Image (cartoon, helix red, strand yellow):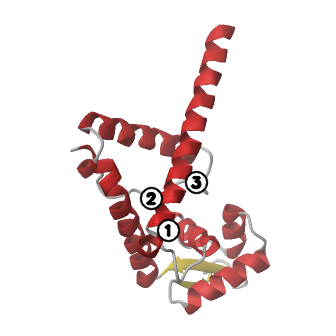
Amino acid sequence: MGRDIAASEEESHEAARAACEVVELLESLWEQVRGDVSTAPVSVSQLRVLYALERAEGISLRILGEVVGATPPSVSRLCDRLQALGFIERETSPSSRRELQLWLTATGRRYLEDLRSRREAALSSTIGNMTPSARTALTQGLAAFQAAAGAAGPATQRPARRDRDSWSA
């Protein structure tokens, strides 16, 4: 049994190394198509806030800070900038007048949809070079990875995405 655990740990390490290599490849790909997949006018920190709000709209600044791992003043400044862009709105909580709830606006949703579309387009040619069985395996592996990451907590969970069948066709 100890041998099975050791083998399982080694497989996990191998998978983690492979995932790190994929992350490095994605970073290179983003760099090559920087103009097409740029997050401008939003910083990476602001993008994390948008993703968090997409998953849990109506959360407070305090909860948002816990989710993104930032202090309340930092989160407040990030939200100020996002509100100025028209991507989020703040409302007084019906349960406590001292607390604000945060919501994505239609503009914020369109921004995220557009960013995802541009990123998917950048990945499509590479994924298109894969065999159908490799695309299916990739889709299944990424779904399993996403489920495992989602089990780690709300900061890593993603909303349901549109159908990925076009990747495995």
Badge 3 amino acid: Thr
Q: Is residue 67 left or right of residue 74?
A: left
Callout 3 crowding tier (Cα within 10 Å): few <14, some 14–19, many ≥20: some
- Dot 3 lies on which element? loop
Q: Which residue is pictured at 38% across the width and 40% down the height?
A: 138
Q: Residues at badges 1 and 2 in contact (C-beta under 8 Å)?
A: yes
Q: Please tell me which residue lies in front, 32 or 12.
A: 32
Q: Is residue 99 visible?
A: no
Instruction: Read off the residue under disc 2.
Output: 159
C-alpha span from label 1 to label 2:
7 Å
Above or below 113: residue 161: above
Which residue in the rendered view is the most extreme toward the bottom? 84
- Dot 1 lies on which element? helix
Q: Residues at badges 1 and 3 in contact (C-beta under 8 Å)?
A: no
Give residue 144's mark. Answer: none
Q: Is residue 142 visible?
A: yes
First-in-chain label (1 vs 3):
1
- Dot 2 lies on which element? loop
Instruction: Read off the residue under disc 3.
Output: 156
Looking at the rendered image, the quarter that the N terminus falls into is top right
C-alpha span from label 3 to label 2:
10 Å
Badge 1 amino acid: Glu
First-in-chain label (1 vs 2):
1
Q: Which residue is pictured at 50% across the width and 89% down the height?
A: 86
Q: Is residue 108 left or right of residue 78?
A: left
Q: Which residue is pictured at 75% across the width and 77% down the height?
A: 74
Instruction: Read off the residue under disc 1.
Output: 54
Badge 2 amino acid: Pro
